[in-house]
Amino acid sequence: MKTRLLPSLAGAVLIACGTGAVGSGRGLVQQEPVRTVILVRHAEKVDESADPELSETGSARASELMRVLADASVDAILVSPLRRTRDTAMPLAEAIGVMPRVVKQGATGNEEVLAGVRATPDGSTVLIVGHSNTLGPIMEGLGAEPIDSFEAYDNLVVATLVGERAVSVTRLRYGATSP
C-alpha cells in the first residue's frame, strides 16, 4: 500500500502545482506540456495610417512593458507584421536577447500564432503582441474565453495552458491607464 500511495500523492501535488503530470500508481507520466502565454495590444500609435510608428506615449508604454516583463523568463515573442507590434516588443526583446518572430494575425485566422505557441518547449513563456481585433480570437484559439475588449492599451493578459487549453486566465494592467 505504501509503495502505491507515495507516487499517487506526488502526482497529486504536481497537478496542484500545474505541471500537467499525473500519477499512474507506479510513477509519474507527463501528459501535456504547460506554457504561459502573455497577451498585450500594441502600444499607442502616432496616427491612424496603415502602418504608423509608436507615439511618445506608446514608446513609454513599450519601455514599461520591458520593465514589467524583464524577469518573466519570456522565451519567445510573437508579433504581427505591422511596425507598432514590433516596436512595442522591441525594448523587451533587446533586454532579454529574444528577437520577435513575425507571424500572420487576423481576426478570423491565427493559425501561425497558435502554431508558434505550440512550437515552444514545455515550460515556455510566450509574449504575443497583437491588435484589438486579433487578441480575442487568439485567446479563443488557446481555449480561453476572450476578454471583453482589447481596446485599452494597458491590458496584459496571462494565460496558463496545459496542452492546448487555457486552464487559467489573469487580466492585469500595466503602464499608464488607457483613456
Image (tube, grey):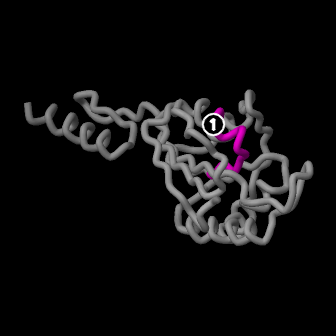
Q: Quadrant of residue 89?
A: bottom right
Who is closer to the viewer here, 26 or 133? 133
Residue 75 in percent (x, y) is at 61, 55
Rendered location of residue 19, percent (x, y): 39, 42
Q: In the picture provided, is 152 more to the left or to the right than 82? A: left
| SS at mark 1 in the image | helix
Q: Is residue 103 magenta?
A: no
Kindly tell me whether residue 16 is visible in this rendering.
yes
| 137 relative to 36, above or below | above
Q: Examine the rendering and report whether any part of residue 97 can be seen.
A: no
The residue under the point 76% across, 38% down is: 105
User: How many badges with numbers are in the image?
Assistant: 1
Q: Is residue 79 above or below residue 106?
A: below
Q: Which residue is mark 1?
A: 136
Q: Position of residue 78 (x, y in %)?
A: 71, 48
Direction from residue 21 to residue 137 in the image, left or right: right
Highlighted magenta segment, given as a residue range: 127-138
